[in-house]
Image (tube, rainbow, N blue to C red):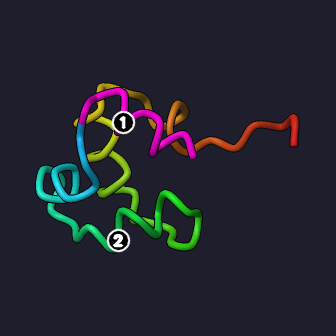
């Protein structure tokens, strides 16, 4: 969910972000739904592209 929010805030579609990080739109969709665990390398590319930290995008909150 955090990834989708960050992507939308940046004004990017799933397809645009996928192209920027070298992934497929389908992969990005699965990551956003929490159904795919991306490699650390892909996580870093996504975070840098969205100007976020890994914690901002991928760290689970303890509140849940």
Residue 64 is covered by the magenta coloring = no
- In terms of image quadrants, where is residue 8? top left
State whether residue 8 is above or below residue 41. above
Residue in the image at 15% along x and 62% along y: 22
| CA distance separating discs 2 and 1 | 17 Å
Q: Is residue 23 above or below residue 20?
A: below
Q: Which residues are magenta?
A: 1-11
The magenta stretch spans residue 10: yes
Compare residues 26 and 36 and report the one nearer the observer.
26
Q: Residues within 10 Å of mark 2 (few under 14, many from 20)?
A: some
Q: In x, y percent, where is residue 40?
A: 39, 57
Q: Is residue 24 left or right of residue 56?
A: left
Residue at coordinates 49% horizontally, 57% vertically from top-left? 32
Q: Earlier in the sequence, mark 2 or mark 1?
A: 1
- Residue drawn at x 62%, y 41% as measured from the top left: 59
Q: Nearer the viewer, mark 2 or mark 1?
A: 1
- Give the farthest residue toward the right: 63
Disc on res. 8: 1
Q: Is residue 35 left or right of residue 53?
A: right
Residue ID for mark 2: 27
**Image quadrant assignment for residue 19:** bottom left
- SS under mark 2: helix
Residue 20: x percent and y percent? Answer: 13, 50
Q: Is residue 3 left or right of residue 19?
A: right
Residue 2 image offset from top left, x and y in percent: 54, 40
């Amino acid at each position: 969910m955090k990834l989708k929010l960050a992507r939308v805030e940046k004004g990017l579609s799933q397809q645009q972000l996928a192209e920027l990080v070298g992934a497929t739109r389908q992969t990005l969709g699965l990551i956003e739904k929490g159904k795919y665990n991306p490699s650390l390398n892909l996580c870093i590319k996504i975070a840098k592209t969205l100007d976020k930290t890994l914690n901002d995008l991928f760290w689970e909150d303890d509140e849940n």
